[in-house]
Amino acid sequence: MLRLSRYLRLRLLSSHSPCAGRRPLRVSPTAASPRDDQVLSQLEGCSGEEQLLEVVGRHKAKLSVEHVGCAMGLLWQFQRDKPQMLRTTEAVRAHPQFLTLRVLAENKISLMDDATVVDMLYNALRLNVEPHDSLIQQLVTEAWNRLDRFEMATLSKLSTCLSDQYLQTSPLMGDITQILSQKLHLIDDARVLTNFMISVATLASPQLRDALIGKADVLLDSMDDSKYNNPRRVVQFMRNCKHADRGLLEKCNRLLVRNLPAMRIEDISMVTGLYQTLQFNKCDFRLGSRERLLELLDNDAAEHTHAHTHTHTEPAVFTKLFATLAPMASTHTRDRLEAMALLLADELSSQQALAVAETLEEIQCRNPQLINKIASILHKSLDQYRPVEIARVAQVLLLLHYQSPDLYSRLRAIMLRYLHSSVFPYEVTMLTRVLSMLPSPRADESMLARVEAVLPQCTINDLNTYALAVAKWLRHDPTYLHSTPSRYVRLLQSLNRYGHERLRLADRLEELLDELRYLSGEWYEDMLLEDAVAACRRLSHQITPGNLPDMAVVITRTNYVCPALLDHLAKVALENIEEVHFSGTYAILLPFAVLNYDTPLVDELFNACIQHLIPHIGSFDPHLLVLLAYALALADYFPEEVIKEIFSVDFLARLDSQLETLPDALNMRIRLRLMELNRAVCLECPEYQVPWFHDRFCRQHQRRGNGSVTPVQQQIHKMLGEVLGGINCARVSVTTPYYYTVDFECVLDRQGQAVPYTAPTHLHIRENGKVQWETQTPEQERLAELPPGAQRIAVDFLGPKSFCRNSRLPKGEILMRRRHLEILGYRVIQIPHFEWNSMELSTPDAWKQYLKKRIFQAPP
């Protein structure tokens, strides 16, 4: 009873979070039996479960510890060698002689050696014996009693068994974690280590986490390259810890890419999901996995030749194939996958249908027949979903623009029921966020009370989510037109209070960065941003080479210049540049380039980072090197090695291949950055002789723009007309060579008088690369030429986004634009919003006087 009560206490204290799947360990029968053991020989000679269980029944009175261990191990071996869909564990457990085997095993636990105790537990769990079964309870308790004398391989296997029972945060796992931290140096097997890493990820301290990463880095070099589950588990550990060591990630990726030809759909799907969570977009893996998945898709017959491989027409396997391949496939392949999804739809489980629906949203599917079919399956399965899953169902249907008021009404009722009964903050947060997305969202007092009850346990991300929901409720609440309802005011006050308190009490930088990394929105920026920057500065002594890139990303996203923090970041980076992975240089340099923070220390940092990354140029992912080069260009750095690499034929071909696999939004962002880099190099570094090849892209992108003029621009245009002597003296939204668009353009002659435009003109780049101002006819072209001594003036209005939140200096992008317009022959006049909208310029006369002074005053 003492042992059982200890086990029950363990279960009550344990975590209930789901455990990621893993490939089972192969267990061999105990080899300590005599050679003439006839019962053991009969057991080892069995070819199936029925035969083995018959032997158990015939000899149950003679079965020793060795016999029981052998029988249990063989039962799992028979099951493991079958495809998942053909396994018969339920029938095995229901067999009368399996009960005999379990009873015998339970009675002989005290006679088992250490390895057999854990092997028995492992095999029983693999045969789906319930964790509350007395055999499992007794084995776990016995293992706990022997914990200190286990070898590391046995302890690793035990940790896997505990994870299978969702005991990752139990006291027993805590004891195992403590032993691991003391005996880590004894492990020399990558499989033993990586199983430990998966099991203890939740409990590992930052020190143990770093030690495990360092040990894995060493052992991966000495292991068999074909054991790709080892690097996969290392990546999974980093995902679970929310800590990516870029160097180790790159090493794992090389091993995984090398093994892609042997991977199954399930393996590729798992790795792809891990990479997405870590935001690790590796070109070679994406291209290789796409090729492998297409091969599996096209060669169904070959799939059946391997015992462990499932055909992609099985719903479970197809769901993984669809979710992994569709987002990076060609239009033809997507159409093919959608057709297959339609054929298999009726066989999909509720979970599989949800996964397919989320993939349809990701690829922006517009196949109404397939969307309606999947939606109908989701509708029928609503009672099977857990709270977070029901929120995912509602969200994906909204994003797919599925129209069904009755379905949304039912979803709302279910989510409200879950919301009022949930005790988990993450569930309440997600349910609240999705409820606010539903048509005509309204919040009642009970919903707001439930939200307020979980606020003390919420992260800043959660608080920001509630603030966004409140904003939506306010917009849709009819009483908001007359007065702000007090219930919303109380909730917002609570959000502010808990947000400030959480930032004030933050004492671990990595946890703080994890909460701040993706934050955005008016509430965060208006209420918490300054406190967030202050918290980062207070914890800046915890900046290390490992978290430098994450810290830099957070600083960039704040759009806030904190000189002390930026200087400290630059100092730490300079002192530890050799410890920073070369790919991390992009994130480190980004805040200085974007926020236009420039000091002698920053100049030293840029030069050090450039020298650090140049030897690794060929190892950069194509899209990341483009982003890095653009950041350097913002700060007016154009290292020749980087520019020559990017604008080589081989690199651009690799970039094109990678762009085919990236999501549409990221694809367009990279194309825009390449265009802007191409423009910057052509204008600022003509000696590199890089051709301008984005003319067609710019025209297409320009056609997609809305070309609208804001009220402020209309106001400035009217004032310019009065100042210059006529509305035809200023043109609006003028396209320059290399496709900049200036808000207004005017020409002043030698005497400083405005020259009216007599014909519509446009700019053109000649074949020799020189700028030419052209009109529609040769006569008009001659008229468009500037008189001697005349100058073209570009007038740009700079809104709030052109500046940092706490600075009146323009950001790096604005400075680069000014440099380029000046190279094109413009005198550039930039009108900051804080000057135009100031109290001093509150009358038309004041605005006109301001424009006269800026335009007609001779430049310094």
Image (cartoon, grey):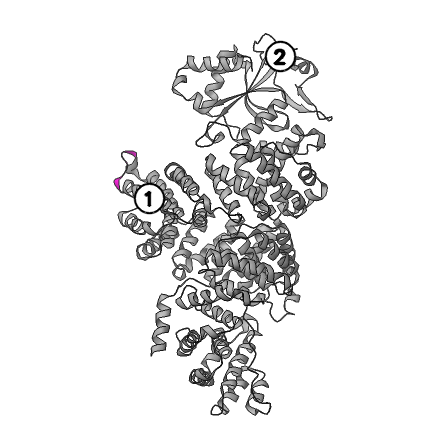
Report x, y in % for residue 174. Answer: 42, 65
57 in the magenta segment: no
- Residue 672 shows in this picture: no
The image quadrant that residue 845 belongs to is top left
Report x, y in % for residue 278. Answer: 52, 52
Above or below, comparing residue 30 to residue 374 in the picture: below
Magenta span: predominant SS is loop
Above or below, comparing residue 739 to residue 228 in the picture: above
- Element at badge 1? helix
How many marks the image carries: the answer is 2
Q: Amino acid at mark 2?
A: Ala
Above or below, comparing residue 651 to residue 124 in the picture: above
Camera-nearest residue between 528 and 21:
528
Residue at (58%, 43%) from the top-left corner? 585
Residue holding disc 1: 495
Residue at (59%, 7%) from the top-left corner? 751
Report x, y in % for residue 106. Answer: 43, 82
| First-in-chain label (1 vs 2) | 1
Residue holding disc 2: 790
Q: Amino acid at mark 1?
A: Leu
State which region is magenta.
Answer: 481-486
Camera-nearest residue between 686 and 293:
686
Disc 1 and disc 2: Cα gap in Å?
58 Å
Quadrant in which the N terminus appears: bottom left
Residue at (36%, 77%) from the top-left corner? 3
Report x, y in % for residue 354. Answer: 47, 57
